[in-house]
């Protein structure tokens, strides 16, 4: 079996885990932040599935097509993660429609950039196809880095919000607090590997990291009553 097939299997497992977490969170959708966790995991499932298909495809044009489709998950995951953290931090907070729109401007523009990249090359400035590894190599354009900075801002803010809540947990909830902090940091590390890592880390790390975070939060929903602690912590 080719090495790339193992990478595709890993991404398929990430997709399956993400969908399972989304299902679990949906069943507990009345819990604070659960809806945003569902949306986050669906974004990660799209990211994982499209990346897996892109890896195993043999035609360069098909690979580029699935790379463009993967941008849907890549761009949607950080905003949903931020909205989840924001809701977790302040369950009573009502985000105005204008602010919601502002959060999504750059991700939506990036998706549009991916669809029209052939005309401007602002997201990817070139593609190459290596053989026999069957790997698509591409260079990043200026808009990729703009979206990367924006995604980092959202994820750093998410880590800060989740950590702030976790540090306020009562003494006998310290284990849950540690879980919150670790789960918040993992996507930040994975996204760094996505942006700066070499193959296969640039393909595998981020969606798998988000999937692991989803599993941890799902455990919090079902077993550790992670989200029920928030009012206690605030009090």
Image (cartoon, rainbow, N blue to C red):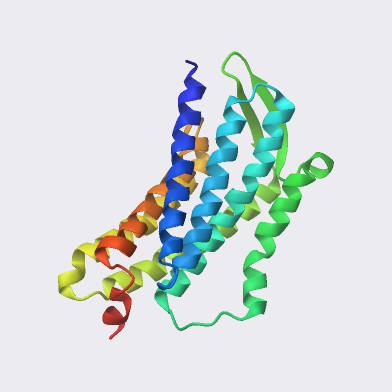
Quadrant of residue 14 within the rendered picture: top left
Question: Would residue 165 be found to the left or right of residue 211 on screen?
Answer: left
Q: Looking at the figure, which quarter contains the C terminus? A: bottom left
Quadrant of residue 63 within the rendered picture: top right
Q: Residue at x 38, y 48 (%)?
A: 212
From the top left corner, tell me how far across and down residue 177 is, in percent: 26, 66
The answer to whether one can see residue 94 in this image is yes
> Along the line of sight, which residue is nearer the eye, 146 or 84?
84
From the top left corner, tell me how far across and down residue 222 is, in percent: 31, 62
Q: Residue furthest bottom?
A: 235
Q: Residue furthest left?
A: 172
Question: Would residue 104 be found to the left or right of residue 206 on screen?
Answer: right
The answer to whether one can see residue 156 in this image is no
Q: Residue furthest top?
A: 132
Count every numbered label the image shows and give the total.
0
> Along the line of sight, which residue is nearer the eye, 215 or 101?
215
> Along the line of sight, which residue is nearer the eye, 14 or 148?
14
Image height check: is 16 above or below 126? below
Question: Would residue 113 be found to the left or right of residue 95 on screen?
Answer: right
Q: Residue at x 49, y 60 (%)?
A: 38
Q: Residue at x 49, y 54 (%)?
A: 41
């Amino acid at each position: 079996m080719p090495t790339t097939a193992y990478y595709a299997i890993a991404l398929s497992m990430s997709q399956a885990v993400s969908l399972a977490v989304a299902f679990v969170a949906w069943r507990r959708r009345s819990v604070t932040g659960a809806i945003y966790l569902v949306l986050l995991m669906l974004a990660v499932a799209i990211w994982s599935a499209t990346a897996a298909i892109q890896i195993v495809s043999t035609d360069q044009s098909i690979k580029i097509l699935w790379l463009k489709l993967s941008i849907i998950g890549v761009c949607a995951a950080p905003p949903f993660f931020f909205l989840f953290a924001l809701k977790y931090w302040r369950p009573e907070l009502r985000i105005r429609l204008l602010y919601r729109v502002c959060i999504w401007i750059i991700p939506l523009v990036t998706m549009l950039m991916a669809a029209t990249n052939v005309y401007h090359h602002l997201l990817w400035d070139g593609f190459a196809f290596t053989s026999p590894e069957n790997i698509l190599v591409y260079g990043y354009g200026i808009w990729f880095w703009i979206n990367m900075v924006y995604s980092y801002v959202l994820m750093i803010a998410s880590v800060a919000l989740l950590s702030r809540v976790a540090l306020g947990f009562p003494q006998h909830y310290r284990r849950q607090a540690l879980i919150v902090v670790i789960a918040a940091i993992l996507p930040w590390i994975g996204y760094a590997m996505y942006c700066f890592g070499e193959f296969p880390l640039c393909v595998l790390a981020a969606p798998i990291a988000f999937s692991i975070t989803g599993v941890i939060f799902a455990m919090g929903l079902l077993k550790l009553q992670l989200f029920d602690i928030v009012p206690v912590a605030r009090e």
